[in-house]
Amino acid sequence: MDLWEGILLVKIGVVLGTGFSGDLGTERIIETGYGNVRIFEFEFGGKKVYGVKRHEELEVPDIMPEKAYMLAFKWLGVDIVYATSATGRLTENVVPGNLLIPHDVIRHGIDERRDTYTQKGLLMHGAPSTIFHDDARANLIAGMHASEDYVKNLYKSSETLESGFFYEGIAHVVSGPTFRTPAEEQDIRGRILVSYNLPDESYTEDHDHLIGMTAREAFAALEMGIPYALVLNCTDHSSYPNHPSVTHPQVLEALNVSGEAGFKVLEEAVRITPEDYINPLSIPIASELDFNYKTVSEKYPKLADIIQKELDSREN
C-alpha cells in the first residue's frame, strides 16, 4: 500500500506478454542491477497500474529480465501482480483459444538457479505452495468469469480459436526460443501419465496442462514477496500429435484475437482487486544470518536495500 496522489490505494503490477505492442502512457526507467526496466503508469480496469512489456527489447524467453522487472515492482511498492502468457497445447482438452489460470508450475530442462536472487551474501528459500498466490488467483478467476461473454463474442468470427475457460491447471515451462519437438513434448506427456497414474491419454478436466516459456517469472515474484498469478493463453497446437508443428507467425496471428481475451481478463482482475488490498507476503529470507548488505550492495544496491528494509520491518 502507498499514497497515490494523496489517496491510499493498492498498487498493482501487470506483465504484458507476446503480441502486445501498444502505447501505455507515462513511463520511467528503473535501474535494477539486472538491467534497466521501462515501467509504464497507466489507467487500466478503473485503477492506476504499473505495467511492463515482457518482450520489450525482443528478449528471448530463456534470457528474459524477469528478476529485473519483479525487483522494479518491489522497489515501487507493488502489492500484487497479474500477467498474461502465450502458451501451446500439451494435452487433449485445452485447445487454441482457451484460457487457463494455473495453480502450479513444472520447469523442464532449465537452469533453476537463474530463477533466484540467491547469490554470494544472500540466501533465499521461497515457499513453493505460494508460487501462484491464492489472492492473485482468486481475482484472476473472478476476472475470467466476468470476461466469458466478451471472449465468446470475440471468437465468433474465428475459424481456428475456440472459447474455453479453465480455472486451474499446470504451467509447464521450457527454455526457448526454439519450440519443443514432438518427441520432447511426448516425453512430457508420458511423465504426466506416470505422475497422475493415468491409464492412457484420456485427460480429464482435473488434468489441464499448457506448455510455454515465461511462467518462470513466478519464482522471481515469490522471492520479492509479491502475490502473483497469470492467465495462460493457448495460441496453438505446439507439437501435439496429428497437427502441424507451431511457428512463431502462427502464434502472433492467433494473438491478434486471443491476446485481447487475455488482456480483458487482466483488466477485470484489476477492476475486482480491492482498493484497500494489503500484501500479506514477506520476502523469504530467514534472518540476518542469510544476508550480507555490503556484499550484495556492491552489484545490486536496490536489492540490498529491499532486503534490509524487510529485515528492519521485522524488528518493529
Image (spheres, rainbow, N blue to C red):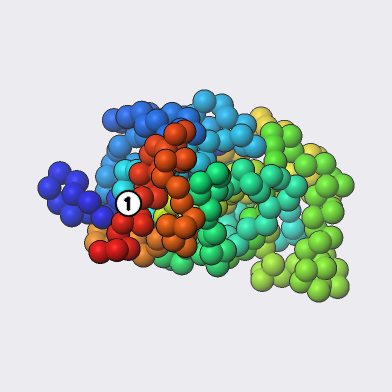
Name which residue lies at 22% across and 51% down.
2
Compared to 122, does 105 lie above or below?
below
Name which residue lies at 67% across and 57% down.
106
Query: Between residues 230 and 70, which one lies in front from this camera angle?
Result: 70
Name which residue lies at 81% across and 66% down.
193
Circle 1 crowding by C-alpha within 10 Å: few under 14, some 14–19, many from 20: few
Q: Residue furthest top?
A: 57
100 relative to 21 in the view: left or right = right
Amino acid carrying label 1: it is Lys
Q: Secondary structure at mark 1?
A: helix
Query: Between residues 26 and 203, which one lies in front from this camera angle?
Result: 26
Name which residue lies at 71% across and 45% down.
110
230 relative to 185 in the view: left or right = left
Query: Between residues 266 and 301, which one lies in front from this camera angle?
Result: 301
- On the image, the x and y values in percent for residue 206 come to 66, 71
Compared to 281, does 180 lie above or below?
above
Compared to 279, does 87 lie above or below?
above
For label 1, the residue is 309
